[in-house]
Image: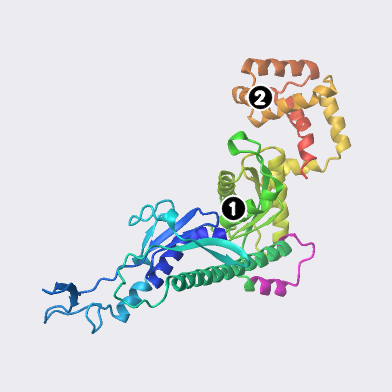
Amino acid sequence: MENLLAAVARQYATEIAALLGRGIALARSDGTRLATALPPVVETDTVLTAKPDGPEVATAPPEGEERTGTDKREGVPSAEATQAVRTSPMSATVEKPDTPSPTAPDLFEDLQWSPVCMEGKTVCLLALLPDTEDRTEVEPVETEDQTLLRAIGILTGMLAAAGRERRSAAAWWSARDRFLEEWLFSAYLPDDKALEARGRQLGIDVNRIRSAGMLLLEPSTDPENGEAAQAEDYPRMIADILDRLRGGGGREVLATALGNRIAVLFETDSLSVAREHLAAARERIEEACPAQVYGGVGMPRRQFSEMPESMREAERAARNARSTRTRAVLAFGDIALELFLQEVPARVWREFRSRVLRGIPEAEIASWTRLLAVYFQTGGALGEAAARLGIHKNTLQYRLRRLAEITGHDPRRLRDALSLYLATMMDTTHNQG
């Protein structure tokens, strides 16, 4: 509730000040200031004249001049004018949360604060600013305490209404999430008509052409991105990510989170458009969260009953991107070789790798495999590969020649490079869970 109030403190303070005709100050429960607002100024056409034997008194305007904003009593604003001002939040002066009121720069700390409680907890503090109007000759309508209680009552009502609205929205999004999980990941789809009807109730048309996307999140250990996110941070991160995705670009975006996976449906039959949208989402997520994100897209589908298969394709592509540390969003069609290699039994793989890398001690296999993987990822660019490995280009050339001498396979020759490339793919193709 405190987070909700922080987002709308200025608006609420302005509205309460207008309703009460008194300046209002709001602060967090720890005393940190949130906002101050002054009541609107009521302008009238009352003319102040001085009697020879007395103080200034209010008189009506000269004959022939129209009186506006006042009733038949001199100097008294009309009920309509007062109501118009008090119900116009924009007419109040609102101060920034980090600056005191210009009319009383030192009063913020000296105010008499009262707690505003909801559900047994103090959600904020409220205080009335000093009344700057001279009301000595006017019979008070209510006492200071009564005004304060009225202000607290108004604020409590505003917060309660906003809380109900927020809970209702959260329940609606939760229902959509459950629907998407059942549609895309359940082993048994419900009856087609029942699925369509439930989708309509939640504002989802399941019959639109869509492309599936999958994003996989890994906590980042990059010092520039801060420490790796803890598991308990994921719900907050995922909620923010879904809000960003659901905001998206004219066409409907459906998204739901399952652990560190984010499933996305884009309303497009273009694989390139889906890939572009998912890449943009991945970049926004990495800017906002301390995580590395890998993405994949499945083939577009025209039938809603085929969307689970498209999502499985997207997840396989995303897992391949993660296992190979590919920064680009992969499409399912991009990983045909990897999918083929996954069907090869692990025993056959081990025998093949042993033959290709014969002569290399088992303890050194991992370091040679990493060197080759980086070399192939850069397309054989010695300078770039050496930079990624943190060695000099000449050192890399020497190691490649040494590898050719030991194994008989030179990575600079196409035929030998293919065998070495397949040998280095063994771990990634059999470890994508």
Q: Is residue 185 magenta?
A: yes
Q: Which residues are magenta?
A: 184-199
Type of the residue with mark 1:
Ala
Location of residue 228 with respect to 199 vertically, above or below: above
Q: Residues within 10 Å of mark 1 (few under 14, many from 20)?
A: many
For the point 71% across and 43% down, the residue is: 320
- Whether residue 405 appears in this view of the structure is yes
Residue 62 x %, y %: 12, 79
How many badges with numbers are in the image?
A: 2
Q: Is residue 368 magenta?
A: no
Q: Which residue is mark 2?
A: 389
Against 247, is 49 above or below? below
Q: Is disc 1 placed on a helix, strand or loop?
A: helix
Residue nearer the viewer, 23 or 68: 23
In this rendering, which labeled residue sits more in front, label 2 or label 1?
2
Left or right of 25 on screen, residue 419: right
Q: Residue at x 70, y 37 (%)?
A: 324
Whole-angstrom CA distance, mark 2 to mark 1, is 33 Å
Q: Which x, y percent locates residue 86? A: 37, 73
